[in-house]
Image (tube, rainbow, N blue to C red):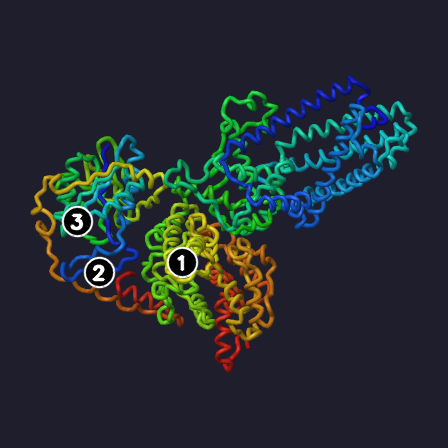
Amino acid sequence: MAPPAISPTGGWIGTTIFVVIFLAALTVFGLRVGQLVTLLAKARREDRTDHLEERIGDFLLVVLGQSGVLRDPIPGLAHFFTFWGFIIIQFGLLNLILGAFNGSLPLIGHDHTFAALLDLFVLFVLVSLIVFAVRRGIVRPRQLSSRLHGPWDGFIILGLIFLVLLTLALVETFGFAASHGEEWSLLGSWFGPSFYGLGTATNVALYRVSWWAHILTVLSFLVYLPGSKHLHLMATPFNVFFRNYGPRGALPLLENLEEREDYGVSKAEQFTWKQLLDGYACTECGRCNTVCPATNTGKPLLPKEIILGVKESLLDRRHEIVGEPNLFQKLPLADVRSNGHEEIQPLVGGVISKEALWACTTCGACMEICPVSIEHVPKIVDMRRSLVMEESDFPPEVTSLFNNIERNGNPWEISNDRRAEWAAGLGVPLMAENPDAEVLYWVGCMGSFDQRNRKVATALVKILKAAGVNFAILGPEESCTGDPARRIGNEYLWQMMAQQNIEVLNSYGFNTAQTETATAQNGHDHNGQTSRARTIITACPHCFNTIKNEYPQLGGHYEVIHHSVFIDRLIREGRLQLPAGFDHRKLTYHDPCYVGRYNGVYDEPRRVLTVINSNGVTEMRRNRNRSFCCGGGGGRAWMEERIGKRVNQTRVNEALETEAEVLAAACPFCIMMFEDGVKGVEAEERLQVEDIAEIVARALEEAATPSTARAGQ
Amino acid sequence: MKIFVCVKQIPDPNTVESKLDPATKRLVRTGVSLVLDPGDETTIAAAIKLRDSLGNSELTAISMGPASAQEALRRALAMGVDRAILISDPALAGSDVLGTARTLAAALKRENPDLIFCSTESTDGYTGMVPGAIAEFLGLPQLTFAREINVEGTKAVIKRVTQTGYEVVESPLPAVVTIASGSFEAIYPTMKGIMSARKKPFSQLSLSDLGLDPSQVGEAGAREQILSIGKAEARAAGQIIKDEGNAAEIIADFLQRHQLL
């Protein structure tokens, strides 16, 4: 705690003034942050303390390692240096503050290495600031702008950071000059000697002025911070720590439907604290906007505006939520917002438009790219829930979808009794006829009823038969999983369908939780057979995702595998013999959102296609976790696309850019959307849309009758 | 105001293939999925809209049918109807237009309704005669094919759909109003609607409650008789015209032949 060479305050009067200002700033800061925390405390509860070890590991990687922002290298690196510069400058600041009390930091207070490191970071941050300013002021990527925040917030922050650096440099320069090098620093040693001529007294005075300027800049920053986008600096570390570790494809369960007061979210405070923390953590970088299929095709949805809209609405309603009259109203300085909006707009249909909510395909690209683990899709669905279940306000074409799912167990006006008609003559047993089947093929509504996707189902049957898999289908016992209903916001209908399907699946002994209990008791499951893992396979990623990740919320635990993974397994186990390199057509593969991003399946389908195809897979510009949605998810397949460009055509054009002849997909909705999209851009002659199962089935036929002409020759 | 809407549970017209029982010559209604007539859903929407615009009014759905028809009435309650009445009696089985209207009218009479909504016709039987018969039994005026209904003082004023547009028709209250199909959008029930439907007043009446004699209704009271049933002739395949430069001419000739041009 060696004293500084020069007292920055010049004695106890200065120090007292400093203490008063410092405590005042700290109090205002504390009150403003306190208001933000109070709002979170008033929100819904949610437990985010599972997976503690992973939380800590990821925290280190994402916060300290900055892995999230570094995926975008130039602004990422600039941010990395700003972040670490910020941390290191805090130590320098502490040292300067201690100077007011004639002290300094132990160990590093007078250490030249630390002083040099500090100044190196000052220089790094300065360069970063230039990068940021050029990006924000000259390059101006569209995603940085925001309807809800003016353009100035970002520049004010950059200006404040620059002032912090500038005043620090001045402190160091005049400190060095006034102490003739005793107060050593890198910048001081560069610029200090030039000021020796001013004389010690002047240099001491300038040192003190700079010190005050530095301290006051930092304190204004502190007070400004809670009301600005730089709130992220405090909220992001928590947001990353408390991110979702559950299955990514599972929407949160709406519990106690029978007794609830509200269904979904129509007011900001109905979100959970974590959903609201997302708003505080948002850095407004707009990466989500750059990948959103709705934003990219001119729809009124910008994911960033959803997050900021929720935050805006929360802050607009801060006094109502905290309760009146409250401290923050009486003490305007403590209020995180100075301006009260005269008329508070509703969250849904006001701050956030209904059209924006209906435009979402729930593809999850926004959540995938967000560097600070913000969860956009659950929020959108929460607000859709309110529109559907509280207001009965949704696109009119959805009414028949809901009625049909509820009455017929499928999205169409078709009796579910006809569910197995597609399999007539194919020799496919029903579960009722083959209850010991080791594999249940969950056909789904598209595979069962849609003419195009029936071909996929037929191809998959060929594959299963060729591999000698003992399988069966449920036929009329199978119903819509409820996935489109849930994603449109009709949680009630989803729960109804899920319960019905869970009952059927459990009756055939597929519930792994049930099997485990039964095995623990007597080594046999309830059918009296020896227990073994029984698998459900499906060609529909939406069925796959909801059965695998969401049915457990209602007690249905199953081993569910997507057909692309199952086929890959059959090949690797040698059960399926495919002619290698049989297909010579140039092929590209589209990752369905609910197989790829939501369930991490990227390699298996590519492996299968690479075996069959002599050219392997030609990737599209956006592939794997950056894949661009077909436009059919989130119930969008059942809604009209009235605004902007067509999502499916946009993706088909990306496939055409690769000059591929085949667009391989692994999802009935993608196939439907792409078949439409190919017609829409009049590319029927150039591009075939095929499911991975169809391509494999054709290869099998080739293997059986090698004399036939090879595809593509 | 006391507003009523007459509704019916029918075999789901979208999925159930209509079958006729050769013995009774009637539509098979058992063992098939039954729904609230989709036409009635839009009529209910019209009634709810009027009730909400009037304020201080009660909307009651009334139906005649077997116990299963409760489901259809629950749906009506979930959509926003305030109260439901089901008339159910074994003696009602086999009722024709006359018996149905007599029964509904008897139940309505006890309630002193101000306005009675009906769909123009049911989506299964399509007779379109029950609303008129109800009006006759109750001695009330009937306004038909309404696409818009308003109450002005003691009058009901409707826009009545015509072939070329609409005419404005009015009548004193009470009155029976039939709704032109396609004029209103069905309401998809909210959760609050579904949950409160379980608690809304629901009464069930038998023939004796209405003071009707079993001989007046059902098979016994029927004045209609179905003499025979037969298959409708399958529609002949249409003519496909391939354009070889003269398609427009052929089509124009075709339309002229049928006096459509």
User: Judging from the image, what secondary structure is the residue with disc 3 in?
Assistant: loop
Residue A506 location (% of width, % of height): 39, 55
Residue A679 location (% of width, % of height): 48, 63
Pair 2/1: label in front: 1
Residue nearest the viewer, comparing B241 with A8: A8
Dot 1 amino acid type: Asp
Q: Residue at x 26, y 60 (%)?
A: B17
* Quadrant housing residue A155: top right
- C-alpha separation, residue under disc 1 versus residue under disc 3: 59 Å
Residue A539 location (% of width, % of height): 46, 62
* Quadrant housing residue B32: bottom left
Dot 2 amino acid type: Lys
The residue that label 3 is drawn on is: B129
Residue A178 drawn above or below residue A286: above
Residue nearest the viewer, comparing A711 with B184: A711
Residue A338 drawn above or below residue B129: above
Residue A474 location (% of width, % of height): 37, 61
Residue A303 drawn above or below residue A697: above
The residue that label 2 is drawn on is: B19
